[in-house]
Image: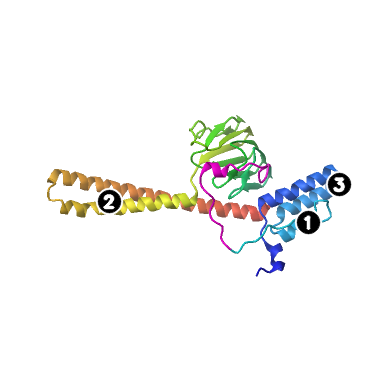
Amino acid sequence: MTDDAAVPEIRASDADRERVAEVLRDALAEGRLDMAEFEERLEATYQARTYGELAPITRDLPVGEVAPPPTSLTKEPVASGSWAGRIVGGEGSSTWAVAVMSGFERRGRWTVPKRFTCFTFMGGGELDLREANFADGEVEITCVAIMGGVNVIVPPGVEVVVRGIGIMGGFDHRESGVPGEPGAPRVIVNGFAFWGGVGVERKVTREERRRLKEERRQQKLDRKASPRELEEDHGEDGHDAHRRMLEGHRDLRRDRHEERRERLDERRERHRERREERHRRHFGD
């Protein structure tokens, strides 16, 4: 049985904070809040960590109290990896993000809206689409980076079109023009960068990277067994046996090089995550 008193301690997501921020903006437009109250509550919204901290912010507004999602004690099955299952329609988890001398990120299981706008000024942001759903088969991300940067991470198979303009800055076009898989969404990245940059990179998820690593490890074990098989193959002449032995050594050296590179990539990823976590604790979400 779940303790109801513990429900307000459920961690709030970026989408939850964005919904509260939308309510505050509506209240400001309707005259229910003045600018000082709006700014004070908006700051509290982006600093909130749990539903218990979010609930009082809108309790006296027409929308009422923020309700936490239902809590399940069982692990939900992983959603299907097919593209058709990831284009879900709807409005998206959030439609904008701002970082002024701070940072923002959208990652994990969130829904990319048909149009998403972000702005950075002497700050940075990250939009990770690898595990995201999509509100439409074509989504448009508009990035404005002033002395700051935005990094967009897309999964393999997604078509990317980059149309941004950079002045003493730039947009990364390396992934633009790569054909997408059938049924995969199309991501358009546009906007403006001044003394800043917008990067676009294609990466697999950690789970997929572990799976590929395991496959390579198994292939390496199979190749290690090949010298023993050569000894048992009496019908093979010495020249062919020697050639295959050299090929096996080259494969082993290549595998060791790939393993060292993967370990270096993992250390860089952990260092980046720790740096972002320190940044979030210092500046807030």
The residue that mark 2 highlights is: 223
Instruction: State which mark lies toward you, 1 or 3.
Output: 1
Residue drawn at 75 percent across, 48 percent down: 21
Q: Position of residue 232 (x, y in %)?
A: 16, 54
Looking at the rendered structure, the secondary structure element under dot 3 is loop
What is the crowding at mark 3: few (fewer than 14 residues within 10 Å), some, or many (at least 20)? Answer: few
The foreground one among 126 and 120 is 126
* Label located before the other in sequence (3 or 2): 3
Range drawn in magenta = 74-95
Q: Position of residue 196 (x, y in %)?
A: 61, 36
Q: Which mark is residue 34?
A: 3
The residues bearing labels 3 and 2 have C-alpha atoms spaced at a distance of 71 Å
Q: Position of residue 155 (x, y in %)?
A: 51, 42
In the image, residue 75 lies in the stretch drawn in magenta: yes
The residues bearing labels 2 and 1 have C-alpha atoms spaced at a distance of 62 Å
* Label located before the other in sequence (1 or 3): 3
**Amino acid at the residue labelled 2:** Arg
